[in-house]
Amino acid sequence: MSTEASDQPALENFWSGMALAVTQVLADYAARVLLAGRRDRLRRFTVESVPGELRQVTLVSLYDVQSRAEKTLEICSVGQRSIIRFNNGLGD
């Protein structure tokens, strides 16, 4: 599936080969799939949060991100408050 160089919005293009009417449910699903992208590649997309204002966004592949968490649990104090941080430990 390629949405580049298309006159149709990506959400409509996602379903175009299936001859389906794009309902809100289908558009929501397509948006989630398109934004998730392929896990082994950069994800580049354009969003319009304010009418007429386009913003380019690039998300890196999770395979390219080095985990900065060395511990699965970190506790520190700031003033009279304690901060408990649960880091990703699913692979440990």
Image: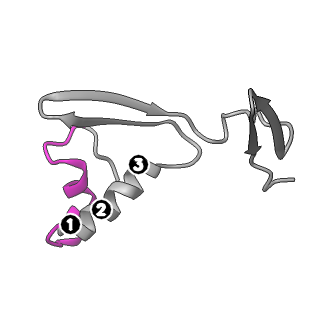
Residue at the image position 80 percent from the left and 51 percent from the top: 89
Between circles 1 and 3, the one closer to the viewer is 1
Query: Which three-letter amino acid code belongs to the residue tagged 3?
Result: Leu
Instruction: Name the foreground residue: 24 vs 3.
Output: 24
Q: Residue at x 73, y 33 (%)?
A: 66
Which secondary structure lies at badge 3?
helix
Instruction: Please name the amino acid that badge 2 sits on.
Output: Asp
Which residue type does callout 1 highlight? Answer: Gln
**Is residue 78 a member of the stretch shown in magenta?**
no
Closer to the camera in the image, 45 or 24: 24
* Image point (26%, 70%), residue name: 25
Neighbour tally class for label 3: few under 14, some 14-19, many 20 plus, Cα within 10 Å: few
Kindly report the distance in space between the C-alpha atoms of the residues bearing marks 1 and 3.
16 Å
Query: How far is disc 2 from disc 1 in space, using C-alphas?
Result: 6 Å
Earlier-in-chain disc, 3 versus 2: 2
The question of residue 19 being in magenta is answered with: yes
Residue 8 % position (x, y):
15, 48
Q: Residue 73 lies in what quarter of the image?
A: top right
Q: Which residue is mark 1?
A: 24
34 shown above or below 59: below
Local packing at callout 1 (Cα closer than 10 Å; few below 14, some 14-19, many 20+) is few
Residue 28 is labelled as 2
| Magenta residue span | 5-22
Per the model, the C-alpha gap separating discs 3 and 2 is 11 Å
Residue for badge 3: 35
Asked where in the image residue 23 lies, by quadrant, the reply is bottom left
- Mark closest to the chain's N terminus, 1 or 3: 1
